[in-house]
Amino acid sequence: MSSCILLFYICVISAQSADSLYRDRAHLPSARQAAELWQAELERNPRAFDAAWKLARADYWLGGHAPEKERRAFFESGIEAGRKAVALEPNRPEGHFWIAANMGALAESFGLRAGIKYRKPIREELETVLHLEPPFQQRSADRALGRWYYKVPRLFGGNYKLAEEHLRASLKANPHSTVSHFFLAELFIEEGRKDEARAELLKVIDSPLDPEWAPEDLEYKSKARSLLVRVKPAS
């Protein structure tokens, strides 16, 4: 009995430590340590749902920020961790969302073959999130589906109208979402709606930081400043 209690407290301390490290994910070694702790917890307890989806989330971040030679492995690890989360809790949104996020990153980063491979499963996972819990993470599934409809070629289901609808739906949950405003700006640039694109980029720059997503917000603010310089007013 005493050994079980000790193991319980070790797991609790590890989880708290990993969460704290992940909050400092802008410092990449902290994100790596958090991922290692969640991986270790999952190995100790294969039914640790929170460790599984949080590992998938950490792998997504690491895949976007680690040296180029490591990125594919992180995204693939994130897909695997997300699938473990779904196997444990199929009616929870976390695993489904982070599977889609890691697949989407692979599709955007590693060429046409990855895009073809993951195109359909990404949409299916995101639609599952919308079915299970539409408000999840400030309607992140709508945001990601907006990106999906923007990036996928029209021949394979891409649709700018649906992209805009999903992105605007995500903004109803969080009108200050830097990611949603930035994605809308990219869509408007592609459609030649330059003044609207500039307005969205200014919203990215002016939006307050979300304490939970500050590292992401800061990155999109930097991207918006760079892009705004290149997008000249239409008139």
Image (spheres, rainbow, N blue to C red):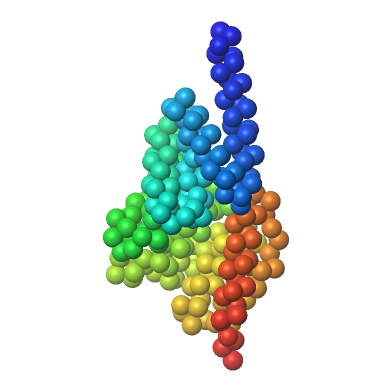
Query: Taking 205 as reference, is 144 above or below it?
Result: above
Task: Tell me how many marks there are.
Answer: 0
Q: Is residue 87 left or right of residue 66?
A: left
User: What residue occupies the far top of the structure in this picture?
Assistant: 1
- Give 62 or 15, whichever is nearer the viewer: 62
Split into 4 quadrants, where in the image is the C terminus? Answer: bottom right
What is the x, y in percent for residue 70? 42, 51
Please provide percent x and percent y for residue 62.
50, 50
Residue shown at 47% from the left, 24% from the top: 44
Q: Is residue 124 left or right of residue 16?
A: left
Residue 126 in sight = no
The quarter of the displayed image where residue 68 is located: bottom left
Q: Quadrant of residue 17?
A: top right
Q: What residue sits 40% from the left and 61% below the top? A: 109
Residue 154 at what x, y percent from top left? 33, 70
Task: Looking at the picture, tell me which residue is in the foreground, 153 or 51.
Answer: 51
